[in-house]
Structures are given as C-alpha cells and as structure tokens.
Image (tube, coloured by chain):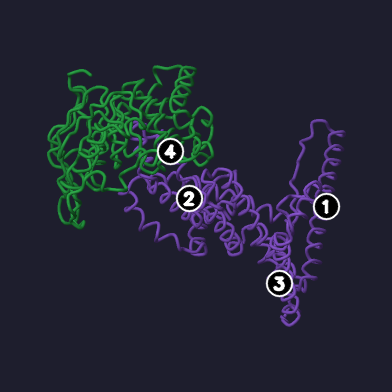
Amino acid sequence: MSSIALKLLKPLGLPEKFNLAQLIKSLVVPMSGMLVFLFIWNIGAQNIHTSLGEFPGPAQVYEESKNLIAEHNRERQKEVAFYERLDIRNAKKLAANPDAVIKTRPYTGKPTFIDQIGTSLVTVLAGFFAASLIAIPAGIVIGLNKTLYSAFNPVIQLFKPVSPLAWLPLVTMVVSAVYVSDDPMFAKSFVTSLITVSLCCLWPTLLNTAVGVSTISADLNNVSKVLRLAWLTHVMKIVIPSAIPMIFTGLRLSLGIAWMVLIAAEMLAQNPGLGKFVWDEFQNGSSSSLGRIMVAVLVIGLIGFVLDRVMLALQKKVSWDKSVELR
Amino acid sequence: MTTKTHLELTGVDIDFPTPSGPFKALKNVNLKIDQGEFVSLIGHSGCGKSTVLNIVAGLYQATKGGVLLDGREVNQPGPERAVVFQNHSLLPWLTAYQNVELAVKQVFKNSKSKAEMKEWIEHNMHLVHMDHAMHKRPDEISGGMKQRVGIARALAMEPTVMLMDEPFGALDALTRAHLQDSLMEIQADLNNTVIMITHDVDEAVLLSDRIVMMTNGPAATVGEILDIKLERPRHRLELADDPEYNRYRAAVLSFLYEKQRKPGEVPTEPVTAEEIPEQINHEPESTPLLADEQAA
C-alpha cells in the first residue's frame, strides 16, 4: 500500500502497519492450509471403507461432536433429575419421621465425553505439576554440581526414552500394593495415571533445568562471589532467574509429553479419561464409533495446542530475555 | 597519599593446570599500591593482566606468594574489593536500580535502613549520571550506560579497592571519553584506590598515578612501572599538546612495541609514538554531553 493510502487510513484508527501482505500472511495462508487439509481429508475418507462403514469425513465428525455435546447435556439433566428425586424422597422421609437417617447416594451415570475431557485435564495437570515439583529442584541441584551431574546423567539418559506403556504395568502393581487405604483421597486409577505421566514427563524439565543452571555466565557467578551471596540467595537471585528461559523450554516439552503419555496410559489401563473414551468407542464398534473417535482425536490435538499456548504465554511473561523470539 | 602500604602483592606465581602439565601464567609479580592511588595495568593481550586482577579480587588463588590488603591476606572474593567487569555483568532481569540494590542490600544489610539504602543507591546512580534511566533494564540502555551502572554498583559497595577489568574496552571512543571523565571526577571526589586494566595507552596516561607495564606471558611479570606526575585535574584537550604527556605516552608505547613486541609479529624498526597511527587517538575538540548515550 502506498504511503498516501497509509496516511489516509491512519485517522480511521487502522493500525499504521496494516497492509495486504501482512493480512495474507497472518490469516489467509493458515486458513488455506486448513482448507487443503479438510479437502484431502474429505476425499480420503470417502475412499476408505472399514468394517464399521466409511471413514468419517469432516461432516460426520461435526455431526458426532454435536451428538456428544447433546449426550452430555442429557446426562446432566438425568443427574439433576436424580438428585431432585433423592431430595424429595429424603424430605418425605423427614416429614414422616424427623429422626430418620438420611442416605445420599452419588449419581453413578456413565461419564460423558466432556466429563472424560475434564478427567484427563485434571490428571495431566496433576502429573505435570508433580513432575515439575521434582524436576526443577533436582535439576538445579544437579546443574550446580558437576559431580552430581556426572553421577546422575547416565540414569537420566537411561530412563528418558522409556515409553509410558513400559512403565504402566509396574506402576499399576506398585500403586495397588502401596496405595492401600479404606477411604482413599484419590482413585487408584488416577494415581496410576498421574505417576505414569510424571515418570515420563520428568526428564525434559530436569535436563533443561540442569543445563540452564550449569551454563550461567561465569561473570554473573563472579558477581555473586564478589558480593559473597549466601548459597540460597545465590540460587534465588542469580541461578533461578538466569535459568528461567531454559526451565520453561523444559516445562513446555514436558507438558507436551505429559499430554501424549496420558492418552496412551488411559487407553491401556482403562483409567477414566479421553484415552478410555477412545478405547471404549473402538470396542463398541457402532457405525458412529469412528466419527466419535475422530472427534476425540481433534479434541486431543486442540487441548494439546491450547496447553502449549498457555505455557508459551507464561514463558513470555517470565522470560527476561526479550531479544529471543519465542514461538 | 599515605606512606603505609595499602595493597601489596608479593612474589605472586600462578600455575593453571593443563593436560600437558601446569602452565605458569604469572611469575614473581611484586607490586605495592598506596591508599587512593590509581594504578593501570597495561600489556599485550594474554599477558596475565586479568589474572593479576582476579588474584587481587580473590577469584583466583595464587600458587605462590600472596596479596595483603591493609595487612590482611586476601584469599576469597569480597565486596571490599569490588570488581567492574569488562562486559558490565549486570543481571539482565533486574533494572539498573535493582542491580545496585542487590549489592547494597548485601553489603549494608546490617548497617543501613531501607530509606538510607534507597538514598545511597540514588546517590551512586547520580555519581555516574544515571539518575534519568535508573529504572530501565540493561537491554533497554546503551553499552556506555550499562558500564556506568556497573561502576555505580561497584562504588555502592564502598570498596577499599576498586578493580576494573578493561571497563571501557567494549565502548566506542566517544562514550569511552565520557566515562573516563566521569571516572576522574568520581576519583577526585572519593579518592578510591583503583586498579584498572587497559589496552589503551592514552587512557592509562590520562587516568593513572602509575602505569604498571607487564611483560609477555607465559610467566609474565611486572616489566616497568611508570610514575605519571601530571597535575590533577587533568583535561584531555590541554594534555594533547603537553610535551610531558607525550613523553609518558612514548614511554609506554616503546615498552609495548619495542621491548615487549608480541612474539610472531613481524620485526620492525624501532618505533616512536608518532609512527603508530592507531594509537594516536586525540579526542575530538568538543563532544556533546552524553549525546551518544542518551540517544539509546
């Protein structure tokens, strides 16, 4: 756009940098990528025939997603109705006999797709926080001490590439044996998923923190020495701030891994969550199953993307090095 | 200047371990510095100037010999020997004010109240002419301003000795001149003891009471010491034509380029000051005050 046009646009409140090239780059190009994908998907789906019928195309998936939401709403209404009936029954009981012992039973309806999303999100965040709580302090200690680093590096390298599926049977057995209580605060399946997720997503944060801490500039360390900062002050004022960019790089990788691991773990262990939803639909084998699985696939992708964006926003907020372009 | 020795290096040797055995970087370095003296260390790169400074700072330990400061042995770093690092070494996540505050809080945590600390930080910022930008972060200010903050941080520790490791080495000539002038003013006010490493002959002659010239490494040591008896306050423009000043420059240059010519350099005829063009570095007639820094 010519400069005259820009001057004319300015009083209209349009951003000065507004121009066609930018608009195309930021909107049109990604949109057309999406359209190409939908097109290929549509064509491809029509040509794949499975024992459960045609592979779902975009239209069926859209229909199924509406169904899933409708199912969720129906289930919620059932639950509300159940509790209303319970309240009425209890009120009647009390009216007849004020000393009656009131029983409240929880609603035991089937968890809907939306419920499973909630379960998976809670599990992944809990597992990720547990892992971070271990990995960041451990990474700082290992990064500050060369001997510790050499001592633990082989162990870290050994466990880093282990798939969640290998951990899962062990974790399940250990949780069953160790986590015994009459009134458990968390379900066993939740604890199993959480530990599996933690074990798998620990490593990127641990390694990145250790590397971030061990690569602090010698000059900043010298500043700390000249000031005779105490160990804890040194860590809080120099080490952690200077390693923050690396720590967040690790955290982002970890959260991505945690989300992928969780779905696999839920599928294999039949722990509640999106993974179980996918597996149940697969076992169910109705004509709408593939469409419903495809909805789950897209939702899993979308949630993974949103989680990453949230971490990125957080990283941008705490990162002092504004010269680095984070993406 | 008092006659009692303030800072003394005696028979300092330092060996660095290398795969092929210890490397002797310094051998038998002896130096006495009085209270309030401004001493420059000059020598070719790699001659161990920084090593000397780091030993005084306590960041390195001498293999043999040692350093006495006011009669006490130096064996670890401490704020009474504040260091101004070549690349400023400000914490990039803190503002200029917070950088100085970190030092002030550490040094005066038991002796100054919060209000006194604030006043003291602002006072030191004022000394280096950084009042206007003290709440900016290092990446928002120019190189010269960063170095000013680095100096403020060192001054704020109220050091017995201030150690400066090529403080102006990374700056352009104009900014460097401004900072040299600032440093001379501060030095006239506070009468700190300063040891400064430099590559710049003009800077050394302009600022120093004594210039310590170091021989080339390995096993580098003090070659010659030149007393600069120019009147203070010194003005760079007046000194440019001062025969005394030029004699000092020539003496340093002849040490560096005749007696301690870097091994591997092509031998040349003996040089005089006038024949080394890159070292003739007369400052411009007038420079707008801090213009280049404020532009940042």
| Residue at mark 3 | A37
Q: At which x and y percent is residue A224?
A: 37, 35
Q: Look at label 2 and name its amino acid.
A: Met
In the rendered picture, chain B carries what hue? green
Q: Specify the quadrant that holds the N terminus of chain A.
A: bottom right
Pointers 2 and 1 within a single chain = yes
Name the residue beneath numbered marker 2: A246
Q: Nearer the viewer, mark 4 or mark 1?
A: 4
In-front residue for pair B203/B153: B203
Q: Chain of mark 4?
A: B
User: What mark, if any, has residue A78 been given in the picture?
Assistant: 1
Q: Is residue A170 left or right of residue B166?
A: right
Amino acid type indicated by mark 3? Phe
Q: Residue at x 48, y 29 (%)?
A: B130
Q: The disc numbered 2 marks a residue on which chain?
A: A
For discs 4 and 3, the disc positioned in front in the rendered view: 4
Q: Quadrant of residue A158?
A: bottom left
A14 on left or right of B177 = right
Q: In whole angstroms, how far apart are the C-alphas of marks 2 and 4?
A: 34 Å
Amino acid type, residue under disc 1 in the picture: Lys
Q: Give how far apart the Cα atoms at labels 4 and 3 are.
A: 57 Å
Which of pointers 2 and 3 lies earlier in the amino acid sequence? Answer: 3
A67 or B12: nearer the eye? B12
CA distance for labels 2 and 3: 34 Å
Chain letter, purple in picture: A
- Location of mark 4 (residue): B175
